[in-house]
Amino acid sequence: MAEKKIAVKWGSKVVDIPVRDDMTGCAFKQEISDLLGIPPKRQKLLGARVADSEILPVNILNGRQRLMLVGTADVATAVQAGDQKNTPESSPEERARVYLRKEIIGLANLGNTCYLNSALQMLRCIRELRGVFESTLEQQCCHDPFLAELRKIMLHQGKDSTAPTVPTRLVECFHGAYPAFAERSQEGFLLQHDSQEALTIILTHIEKALKKVSASGQSPFGDLFHISQRETLECTAHDANTEPEKKTTHSPSLMLVCHVHGDVSTIENGIESSFRPEPIEKHSDALGRNAIWQRTSLIEKLPQYIFVHIARFMWRQDTAQKAKILKNITFPMTLQASRFPQVEPTKKEYSLVSVITHKGRTGDSGHYVAWSKQEIPSLEDQSARDGTASTRASQSVWVVLDDDCSSVVSEEDIKRLSGGGESHSAYVLLYKVIE
């Protein structure tokens, strides 16, 4: 669909804003933000009604309706209309906007698909995984429709447009592969689902695909995501003259779980509680009957990326709903691995790079949003192809990815996602090892 431009008056200037026939109000405001540095929340458009979730009105798209913009730019060096060149002397703010314009994609909500959009956005911030899709999984996509559509989303980069991606085919393939997510209400609307469950299913799907293309059965997936654990079961009932019966198993998991109960107020406390020894009843071959065993789990090896699931939902019999635990659970920007129960303690540190939040009171309703940390390459990296040089350091910014809308936020905004009410509460956290 061809782009066209409409004139928007901002102060004494008339700015040409690129639009498309399928552009939503949210995407239109983001386009203004990219060009002028005015965050969408500060924009006030006079002359026509522009709703975030609706396609722009025809009278705007055909240029018949003149719009006036009221709003203050974030920086004094806002990009001038028609001047978007990213030169070596560009300000950090301008370079960030230009880079994010190419790197970030919006994903249209097809009706309660925010849970899937947020999971996909979290995965897109893992560059190593995008590299796997670019090389290792290319052939496997020919035999797997969902994987093929997933690859398109993962590698969707360099698109110099804020027009959102409409993932219709991906959602269809996801529903085809996992019919439980295709359920609809009596009115015919898609039901809301759990973003953490969707994320786990997608990761498992990728892992299985990688195993199929690996001759040795080994793949980069384990180094990237597997949390290797050792579980020991020890029978507490035994004679004084005999050794206690023991069973040890080794298994990988994709996420650390932060249980929200009792006095848990941080993810470190919640994770530690999930590793506490616990008694279970199990059959003893030596005794020939059921007995009490002590189960103990320890981490053997940590991956490059750690997903932390804050278990915020619980089933309530009285309301027959998956209720949200409205409790403030803080999380660090830098996670110390030494806090985890391990076979051999490590001093590794992990930096927070992405968050999935849930807004609402129940797991079957509400809204999911992704927040990701974007590393803006230094000018030296960006201009390497031109042969120019620079010693300026790279910068990082946090971006909120709310379906087809995105905007830059502060680190303080991220820290405020600890919950405590119906507002955005951290549900899944993604940490990357600090090399």
Image (spheres, rainbow, N blue to C red):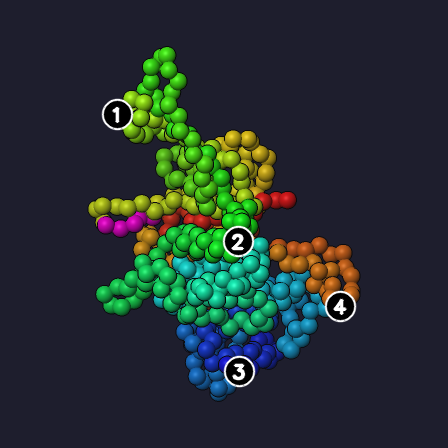
- What is the secondary structure assignment of the residue under circle 1? strand
Which mark, by number, is residue 328? none
**Circle 2 sits in a helix, a strand or a loop, which is it?**
loop
Q: Amino acid at mark 1?
A: Arg
Give the quarter of the figure containing the C terminus. Answer: top right
The residue at which mark 4 appears reads as 386
Q: Which one is earlier in the sequence, the residue at label 2 or at label 4? A: 2
Q: Which residues are magenta?
A: 320-324
Q: Position of residue 5 (x, y in %)?
A: 55, 82
* Residue at the outermost top position: 241
Query: Does 308 appear in magenta?
Result: no
Can you tell which of label 1 and label 2 is closer to the viewer? 2
Residue 321 in magenta?
yes
Residue designated by label 1: 289
Per the model, the C-alpha gap separating discs 4 and 1 is 75 Å
339 horizontally vs 326: left or right: right
Mark 3 — residue? 2
